[in-house]
């Protein structure tokens, strides 16, 4: 029996695990890219600002060359006036360092040809100073006899980086969530197909050998290939089991007539002989045993074929159990054993084959009677469990060693010490076959001392 | 009694026919379903034994056809080993009893006899009697020689069945099926145990025995 895999829960699912792993990897790679882009942009924007200031210095030089000091002073004053949010600042100083025009900038910090960062505090930018500017990148150039000191607020850098960050973070979130959603989608699709494979295998394990995994629409991926291989294997299995079943049926069928004739001849001889012939009686009795074994074997094969479910009718298990116990009570009594029944008063209803169900109970009781010594206490109990009726047969006899428990359901298996006792070793396999037919589970456990056989029916089997 | 045997295996058919003849019956053999059908319509048989698997027309269809033709003679179907639904399907087709192959002739004979002398259904009496043993179905009471006998429900059920078939040989399997509805062969002495319990109550305390063991066949209740 295949244990049902718990579906759709937690990290155990391959699909969820894979999609999370990919998301994590993606997050790390994206973070590295993010910082790289951030750093590069920061550098490029600053380069660009420096280029701008250098080119501005050259432009001022041309203004001075064309219009002299007054033109230069006017131009710088005008630019200082119109600078938006004090983004760009300019100061013109005389040779002695005296302020001539523009914004007052801490002179010492600015040196020719270098780019120096000045915090806002060292700049007297007036009331229009933007709160978003925390400092200026500055540069000092000589224009004729004067010094031109210009600065560009870091605000523009901040703005560019902010825009970049927004774009990167938004893209990052988009990519990660798209990855997770696609991962989920692919995962659910995969899960569904794996689910159908598992469902098919479970049905096959329950005996529906003709079931096959449905073909997935779309292209042939690895799961389709697995499904194909499993289907091919199931086909092979079905053929094998079918031929095995067929062999058993064929043998029994072919032996039907010879056995009938053998028995007839023995009977005929017995009638012809006057008086008692022990050999003849023994031969007839052995023939009976052979016939009984074949009969049981064929019956198991037919029950396992599973066509019987179409003959199911409503059955009162309680009444059936009471009847069977009543029949066997005197038999147990004659063996010096006590057979008791614990059966609820009301009806214990289910669907099933009444003849097979009473054979099931009778086999369990006979099994206990035959393997227990005189003085043993046997009990057949029936209760209405949460999942369906539960039938149990317990005794305080010698029991079965734990390592042999799973083997007793095999055909012709006999527990070592019981080899000498009567029986053809098909009683429990028949019980098992009847249980399987009725969707019931049968299990053995120790009754300490003794044996307990428990049959758990599914709620209204095959109703 | 005139009995039709429809069986394709010649040796088995011969054996059944000669054994029936030895019991004083007249047996007619048909080797396939078609031939069996013609015989069944042409002649007035007291009973028919029909194999389930026959050439030309299978046993079940043959039984159905015979019943459709309004032939009412009792029919026993012979079914294959392990035949799980054979009993139900046979009875549904219109047969009166079924027997699994291979079978003992004594079994077939006992079942045929029980069928051929089956009393009409309506005239079931409420008071059944064999010699001085009486059973009242209405009052649920049993007495022998005027003496009340207390029986367990299971013993009572067995006695009712035996009284209904008084004088006939009842085999182990007939009792298992008829009294306990067991359609399989138990591996313990279920029948023997119950017979001996019943015997202890209805026979032991009295001078003559009514419940007889028929060697190699079964049991019979008669005086």
Image (cartoon, rainbow, N blue to C red):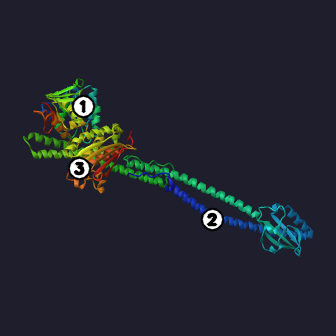
Inter-mark Cα distance, 1 to 3:
40 Å
Between discs 2 and 3, the one toward the N terminus:
2
Identify residue for label 2.
A32
Say the numbered circle drawn on residue A143.
Answer: none
Q: Which label number is shown at residue A372?
A: 3
Asked if A373 appears above or below A156 in the picture, the reply is above
Q: Quadrant of the N terminus of chain B?
A: top left
Chain containing the residue with disc 1: B
Host chain of mark 2: A
Separation of residues labelled 2 and 1 (CA atoms): 89 Å
- What residue is shown at x 9% (from left), y 44% (from top)? A277
- Seen as rendered, the residue at the extreme top is B123
Question: Residue A352 appears at what percent x and percent y?
Answer: 34, 39
Q: Quadrant of residue A43?
A: bottom right
Q: Which residue is mark 1?
A: B96
Residue drawn at (80%, 61%), measured in percent from left and top?
A: A130
Tell me residue B58's x, y (percent): 27, 35
Q: Residue at x 17, y 45 (%)?
A: A287
Q: Secondary structure at mark 1?
A: loop
Q: Is residue A272 left or right of residue A403?
A: left
Which of label 2 and label 3 is nearer to you? 3
Numbered disc 3: secondary structure = loop
């Amino acid at each position: 029996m295949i244990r049902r895999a718990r579906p759709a829960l937690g990290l155990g699912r391959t699909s969820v695990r894979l999609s999370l792993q990919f998301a994590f990897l993606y997050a790390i790679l994206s973070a590295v890219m993010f910082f790289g882009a951030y750093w590069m942009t920061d550098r490029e924007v600053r380069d660009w600002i420096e280029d701008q200031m250098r080119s501005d210095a050259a432009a001022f030089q041309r203004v001075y060359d064309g219009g002299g000091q007054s033109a230069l002073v006017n131009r710088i004053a005008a630019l200082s006036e119109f600078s938006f949010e004090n983004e760009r600042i300019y100061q013109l100083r005389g040779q002695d360092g005296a302020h001539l025009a523009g914004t007052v900038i801490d002179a010492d910090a600015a040196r020719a040809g270098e780019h120096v960062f000045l915090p806002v505090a060292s700049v007297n930018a007036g009331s229009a100073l933007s709160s978003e500017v925390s400092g200026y990148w500055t540069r000092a150039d000589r224009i004729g006899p004067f010094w031109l000191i210009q600065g560009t607020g870091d605000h523009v850098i901040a703005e560019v980086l902010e825009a970049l960050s927004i774009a990167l973070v938004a893209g990052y979130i988009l990519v990660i969530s798209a990855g997770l959603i696609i991962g989920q989608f692919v995962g659910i699709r995969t899960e569904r197909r794996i689910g159908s494979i598992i469902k098919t295998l479970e049905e096959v394990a329950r005996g529906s050998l003709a079931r096959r995994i449905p073909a997935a629409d779309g292209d042939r991926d690895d799961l389709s290939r697995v499904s194909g291989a499993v289907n091919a294997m199931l086909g092979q299995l079905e053929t094998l089991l079918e031929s095995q079943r067929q062999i058993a049926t064929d043998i029994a069928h072919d032996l039907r007539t010879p056995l009938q004739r053998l028995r007839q001849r023995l009977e005929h001889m017995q009638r012809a002989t006057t008086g008692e012939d022990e050999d003849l009686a023994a031969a007839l009795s052995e023939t009976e045993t052979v016939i009984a074994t074949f009969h049981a074997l064929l019956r198991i094969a037919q029950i396992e074929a599973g066509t019987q479910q179409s003959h199911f009718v409503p059955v009162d298990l309680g009444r059936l159990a009471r009847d069977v116990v009543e029949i066997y009570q005197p038999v147990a009594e004659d063996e010096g054993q006590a057979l008791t029944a614990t059966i609820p008063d009301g009806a214990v209803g289910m669907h099933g084959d009444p003849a097979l169900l009473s054979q099931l109970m009778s086999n369990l009781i006979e099994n206990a009677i035959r393997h227990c010594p005189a003085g043993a206490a046997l009990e057949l109990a029936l209760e209405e469990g949460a999942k369906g009726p539960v039938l149990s047969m317990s005794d305080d006899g010698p029991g079965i060693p734990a390592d042999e428990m799973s083997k007793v359901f095999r055909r012709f298996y006999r527990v070592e010490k019981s080899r000498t006792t009567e029986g053809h070793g098909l009683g429990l396999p028949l019980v098992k076959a009847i249980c399987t037919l009725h969707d019931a589970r049968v299990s053995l456990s120790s009754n300490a001392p003794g044996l307990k056989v428990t049959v758990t029916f599914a709620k209204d089997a095959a109703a | 009694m005139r009995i039709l045997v429809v069986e394709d295996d010649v040796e088995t058919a011969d054996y059944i026919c000669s054994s029936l003849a030895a019991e004083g019956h007249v047996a007619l053999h048909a080797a396939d379903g078609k031939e069996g059908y013609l015989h069944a319509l042409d002649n007035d048989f007291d009973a028919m034994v029909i194999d389930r698997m026959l050439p030309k027309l299978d046993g079940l269809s043959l039984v159905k056809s015979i019943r459709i033709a309004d032939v009412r003679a009792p029919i026993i179907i012979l079914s294959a080993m392990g035949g799980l639904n054979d009993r139900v399907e046979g009875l549904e087709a219109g047969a009166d009893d079924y027997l699994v192959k291979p079978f003992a002739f004594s079994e077939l004979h006992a079942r045929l006899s029980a069928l051929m002398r089956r009393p009409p259904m309506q005239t079931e009496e409420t008071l059944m009697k064999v010699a001085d043993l009486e059973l009242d179905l209405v009052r649920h009471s049993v007495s022998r020689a005027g003496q009340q006998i207390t029986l367990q429900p299971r013993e009572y059920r067995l006695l009712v069945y035996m009284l209904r078939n008084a004088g006939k040989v009842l085999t182990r399997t007939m009792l298992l099926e008829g009294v306990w509805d067991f359609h399989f062969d138990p591996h313990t002495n279920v029948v023997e145990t119950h017979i001996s319990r019943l015997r202890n109550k209805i026979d032991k305390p009295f001078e003559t025995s009514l419940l007889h063991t028929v060697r190699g066949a079964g049991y019979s209740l008669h005086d």
